[in-house]
Amino acid sequence: MEQLDPRISYRALQSRDPRFDGRLFVGITSTGIYCRPICPARPAKFENCRFFPSAAAAQEAGFRPCLRCRPETAPDLGAWRGTSNTVSRGLALIAEGALDGDDASVDGLADRLGVGGRQLRRLFKQHLGASPIAVAQTRRVLFAKQLIHDTRLPMAEIALAAGFGSIRRFNETFRQLFRRPPSAIRRKTVVALPEGSVAATGVTVRLRYRPPYDWPAMLSFLRARAIDGVERVDDSAYSRTVLQDGQVGTVEIGHLPEHESLVATIRFPSVRALPGIVARIRRVFDLGADVATIGAHLAQDPLLAPLIAQRPGLRAPGGWDGFELAVRAVLGQQVSVEAARRLAGRLVQLCGVAMPIELRSHAALTRAFPGAAQVAAADLKPLGMPNARKLALAALAEAALADPLLFQPLGTVEDTVARLRSIRGVGEWTAQYIALRAVREPDAFPASDIGLLRGAAGRGGLRPSPAELNGRAEPWRPWRAYAAQHLWAADAAASKAMPKEATHG
Ligand SMILES: [Zn+2]
C-alpha cells in the first residue's frame, strides 16, 4: 500500500486539514467508525486511529462510515490517483458499474484493462489499500447513503439506483454495516416521493471537488461548443439532454463554491441509470482531478509555470459520451470551434432523437445527440462539409455499432490510439483528441494541434514542430492532457481578437 505516515496523518486529523480530504480516511478502533480528516467530532486518541488511503480500504477493514462527516461526500479523487493508469481506468469502469450485477467479475474487468486478475488486485491493493470488489461495494453503499440523505427517492429505487442486485441485498448490507435499516439513516424531514418522480422533478445530488476549481473557464469551454437543441449554457449553469439505453432525459449542473461542490439535477425515467449519469457528469466536469498536485508537477517547466499560476483551477473537460465526442472531433477537423459547433447542430437536426415536450426541462432542449445507430441510418448529404468527412462519420458510426467497447479505456493509451486510427478518416490528431476527452486518458497529447503549437510558441515566439512539441512534453507525463488544456486556454486568450484560424489540424 502507498505509505501513509501515521504521525503526519494524525497531525492532519488534529488540524482538520482539508488538503487531506479525499485521500486520507481514519478508522477509529474504539467505535468502529471511519471518518474524513475534517470530521467535526473530537479527534480520537492516536493509538485508536488507523489510517487508510481510500474509503474502500477503511470499509474493507471493517469500519463503517461516520454519519457526521459523511465519507460519501468527500471529493472522489479515485480517477486520477497515483501514477497507475490501470488503476485510474479500472476505477472509471467500476464507477460505470463494471463490477455490478451477477455476471461481473474482477477477472473480466482485468481482461478489459489488458492485465491479469492477480496483477489488478495487487495494483488496487498498492494504490488504494483495497480490493476491486471492496471498491465496488463501497461505491454502492456510499452512493446509496448519499441518495438516502440528499434525495426523497423511495428506498426500493435507491437500491436499484446504487447497483444492488435486489432490495434484500441492499437491506442486508446496510444492517450489517450500520446495524440499522436504511430508512433509519434518512433525516426525519425527508418524505419519500411517489414513483416516477425522477423523470419529472428530478434527483439533485452534490458532487464535491478538491479546490481550486475554475468554474468560469469550464462554463466558457462548454459554451463555445454548446450544440443547439442538445446543450444550453447560461451565466451560472450547464444543461443538456441525455440519451441512454434508448431513454431520454436531462441534466442541469451548477456550482456551489461555498460547498466546494457542483450540484446536479438529473431528470431521467430510470433510476438504474443514475450512477452512470453521475459518472458522466464527473467525467465532463473533471471532478476527480487533484489539480494542485498536477499543477505543481507541470509548473516545473518554465513554459507552463506562468500559465498554471494564472489558472490554477483549470480542469480538462471530458466528453459526455464517447461516440458523441468522436463525432465532434471529426466535425472539428480543419475548421474552427464555432464552425464545428454549427455542423454538430445541423447533424442533430438531421438525426437527433426528439425530446418529448413534457420531458424538456427547458424549451431550448429539444433533441438528444444521435447515437451510432441514428447516424448510421441517416442521409448525411445535407451536411455542408467535404465528402471525405461524411464518409468518416459513417465509418465511425459503423465502427461504434460493431464494437460497443470502442470508446472504453482498454489497454494503454497507445493501444487506444491505434484502435481508433484503424477507423477510416481518423488520423493521429483525432485519435489523440478522442483519447483525451472521451477515454479520459490523462496522458493523451495531440501534439499536431495548431492551438497547442501556437500556445507553446507563446507571444511572438517560434512555433515548434509537432515532433519538437512531443519532445518538450516528455517531462509533463503522466499529465500531458492538463498541459494541453493550459496551452489551449493561453492560446484562446491570446487569439481572442485575432482572425480565426483552423484550430484542429
Ligand atoms: Zn466523522
Image: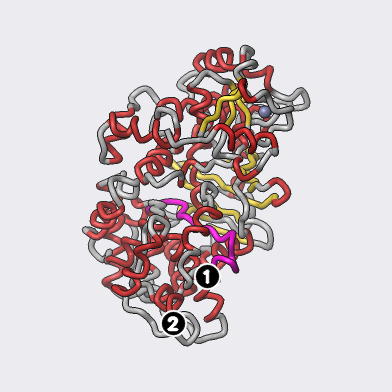
Which residue is label 1 attached to? 489
Residue beneath the point at 35% across and 27% down = 104
**Residue 6 as seen in the image, left or right of residue 442:** right
Q: Amino acid at mark 1?
A: Ala
Q: Position of residue 416 (x, y in %)?
A: 28, 53
Q: Nearer the viewer, residue 30 or 91?
A: 30
Element at label 2: loop
Which quadrant contains ligand 1? Answer: top right
Q: Which residues are magenta?
A: 307-322
| Position of the C terminus by quadrant | bottom left
Q: Is residue 382 visible?
A: no
Q: Is residue 502 visible?
A: yes
Residue beneath the point at 23% across and 63% down = 424
The magenta stretch spans residue 317: yes
Q: Amino acid at mark 2?
A: Glu
The label number, if any, that marks residue 157 in the structure image: none
Q: Nearer the viewer, residue 24 or 170?
A: 24
Q: Position of residue 55 (x, y in %)?
A: 53, 30
The answer for how far apart the CA atoms under marks 1 and 2 are is 15 Å
Establish if 289 lies above or below 269. Answer: below
